[in-house]
Amino acid sequence: MKARVNTSIIPDTLERLMDVRGITADKVRAICQELGVGNLRELTTAVTLDQLESIPSLTPENRKNIRRALKLEKDIDHRIQLWDAILQGKEILQYIRQFPEVKKASFAGSLRRGKDTIGDIDIVVEVAGADRKRLLYKIDRMPLTEHIIAAGRSWICALLHNQVLVYFYLTDQQHYGATLLYYTGSTSYNLSIESLATQKGYRFDANGLYDMAQRQYVTAENEEEIFRHLLLDYTPPELREGQELVVAANQHKIPSLVTFNQVKGDMQIHTNWSDGEESIERMAHYVFSVFPHYQYIVVTDHASNERTGHVLRPDDISRQAAEIIDINNAIGHNYVKKGVEVDITENGELSLPDELLKTFDWVIASVHSHFTTDNTARLLKACENPYVHCIGHPSGRLIGSRHPYPVDWDQVFAKAAATSTAMEINARPNRLDLNDTLVKKAIANGVKLVIDTDAHSLAQFDFMQLGIWVARRAGCCHTDILNTFTWEEIEKFKKSKRNAIA
Ligand code: DGT
Ligand code: CA
Ligand code: ZN
């Protein structure tokens, strides 16, 4: 006969282990006894030290599920790119929002903060207590779901077929604000909110914001109400990384961040004159109708000696210019600007001579070779060229496949600011280059940024939002971002470069 399990010795905080697939009360008891752990923190330490290996009743699958449920199996080499996580996350949101049990659902975690890579997807869901079992049943049966890793009253962890983990945090209307705030994180931001809340007579944790004097949880349907209780400025998720932003919110110094609606144009685009998929005309008409608030686009095909495949040859330049004039005549104004992306060669020269460079409205100079050597000198020299307006994808990194090359950024940003050369935030999902940290440094040095999609096809114009996230995470206002300016203002910026070099 099977012995009755005595669960009374399982500490409250470890009861959630029994939510994990394949983990029985017996197994939790064995973990508590054999590892001598009495709370979640001790368990986390033991799991991190691989001590679960020593418990005979746990199968490798059990151990893996515990690590996944506790988010202790994060592999820095296998983080998902933000764009993929957004597409995946939106699909899940769309799916679960159809369930009558789901009153409301939002992204949380690093996905909501717009980090360039994502460890796992976090979603906060408003669902009545009585409906939670049914919701679990439906999530288990979503076509995307491989199986459920853990499920309890307040959470569901699902493994998708593509091995991405999705955590659903279940809450009610009155605690939605605090739950969303907590699971949006980041962890270090939460820790500083926790200590500030304590100073102000509250306790803040995964259960919400507890008013010590009133002896009850603060009810708040949205985050704004929680910020108001703590007398803090509302802080956009993109800024919630470290402690300094809690201090800024307490002093009412949260910057007004750039938004997608402020963008007036896209300044790096490739057409079928080089390696893009579409004609200039198709791209122009597409952007004109899909992004009605844009005032211009800059066509910047490659004029390159280093690239294989289709590039803009010197004798193509005047023919392309004539085509742009025709398209602008049809549109009715100078909507399409004539730009180019040139290579910065090994010694810092450019792949077109100055006589040709000066015929363009906008010149981007980019490093497309020698990705491991220190490229400071090449970038400095490119900034000094009077006809170069912007440095493309300045650090050269490709997320997951190529490290940024070494650069002395202090020198490069000082030169860029002194010569009025803009730096790009290239918004392609695997670039996001400059990244948030470097953009923050750039604006501190007075450098202007341009957010470009580097679109090679129509759908890629959507990447603009990724670049906006990078800029917002760096604390950029619209005045830091050149393509929130009118073209007349951009002409002034170009003129300041000519004056600086002269
Ligand atoms: P990721 O998934 O690695 O890209 O990064 P996050 O930021 O999404 O982190 P994740 O998924 O481990 O947890 C989601 C949020 O939950 C996190 O940003 C803040 C909150 N959180 C998680 N663990 C803790 C913790 O131990 N303490 C506090 N204060 N907050 C936590
Ligand atoms: Ca996460
Ligand atoms: Zn390029």
Image: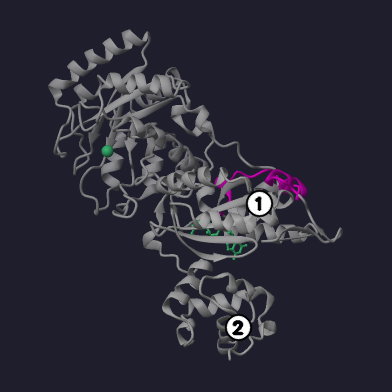
294 up-or-down from 124: above or below: above
Residue drawn at (57%, 44%) of the image:
97
Q: Is residue 79 left or right of residue 31?
A: left
Percent coordinates x, y for residue 198 in the rendering:
75, 61
Residue 179 percent across, percent down from the top left: 66, 54
Q: Which residue range is magenta in the image?
A: 220-241
Query: Could you classify mark 1 by the number of other residues whose Cα lies within 10 Å: few (under 14), some (14-19), or many (20 or more)?
Result: many
| Magenta highlight on residue 238 | yes
Which image quarter is the N terminus in? bottom right
Judge by depth and name the residue closer to the eye, 96 or 243: 96
Say above or below: 290 vs 447: above
Q: Quadrant of the C terminus?
A: top left
Q: Residue at 66% of width from left, 54% of height from top?
A: 131
User: Could you tell which of marks 2 and 1 lies nearer the N-terminus?
Assistant: 2
On screen, residue 364 versus residue 179, left or right, reads: left
Q: Which residue type carries mark 2?
A: Val
Pick the residue in front: 271 or 286. Answer: 286
